[in-house]
Image: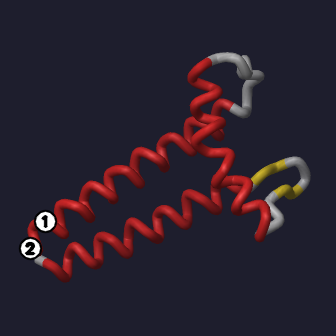
Amino acid sequence: MNTVLISVLQFINLIIEIYIWVVIIAALITWVQPNPYNPIVRFLWNVTEPVYRYIRRYIPTNFGGFDIAPIILILALEFLQILINNIIGRLY
């Protein structure tokens, strides 16, 4: 049973890692003038913007034209990864 739980937690950890990279790429793309009709830009917007909106509802994230919502999201995801890795370490 532990091996199944460890595998599930490792899969969740992998999904979180991929999502962190998606957030980083989406943040980098905003530095240029992306075409809003590009399918990749739309995908990144659709995947990240709902989470940003949730963060912005509770925390003011705009400081002098600089949005820190991606930074807050990445820190929260890193904290979640640390928590999952600690759980996996205890199950071994």
Report the side of 2 relative to 84 (left or right). Answer: left
Comparing 30 with 37, the one in front is 37
Q: Quadrant of residue 12?
A: bottom left
Q: Which residue is mark 2?
A: 1
User: Which image quadrant is residue 29 in?
Assistant: top right
Determine which of the numbered discs, if any, sits on residue 22 in the image: none
The residue located at (26%, 64%) in the rendering is: 9
Q: Kindly identify the residue that appears in the image at 41 percent across and 45 percent down.
A: 18
- The location of residue 25, given as percent across then percent down, is 56, 36
For the residue carrying disc 2, how many other residues have a C-alpha within 10 Å: few (<14), some (14-19), or many (20+)? few
Residue 47 sits in which quadrant? top right
Q: Which residue type does callout 2 highlight?
A: Met
Q: Is residue 64 left or right of residue 90?
A: right
Q: Secondary structure at mark 1?
A: helix
Left or right of residue 49, residue 23 in this image: left
Q: CA distance from mark 2 to mark 1?
A: 5 Å
Q: How is the image coloured?
A: secondary structure
Secondary structure found at label 2: loop
Residue at the far right in the pictured view: 64
Q: Are marks 2 and 1 in contact (CB under 8 Å)?
A: yes
Residue carrying label 1: 4
Q: Position of residue 79 (x, y in %)?
A: 47, 70
Quadrant where the C terminus is found in the figure: bottom left
Residue 89: x and y in percent read: 20, 76
Check the image and report above or below for 35 versus 79.
above
Rendering coords of residue 27 (x, y %): 65, 40
Q: Amino acid at mark 1?
A: Val
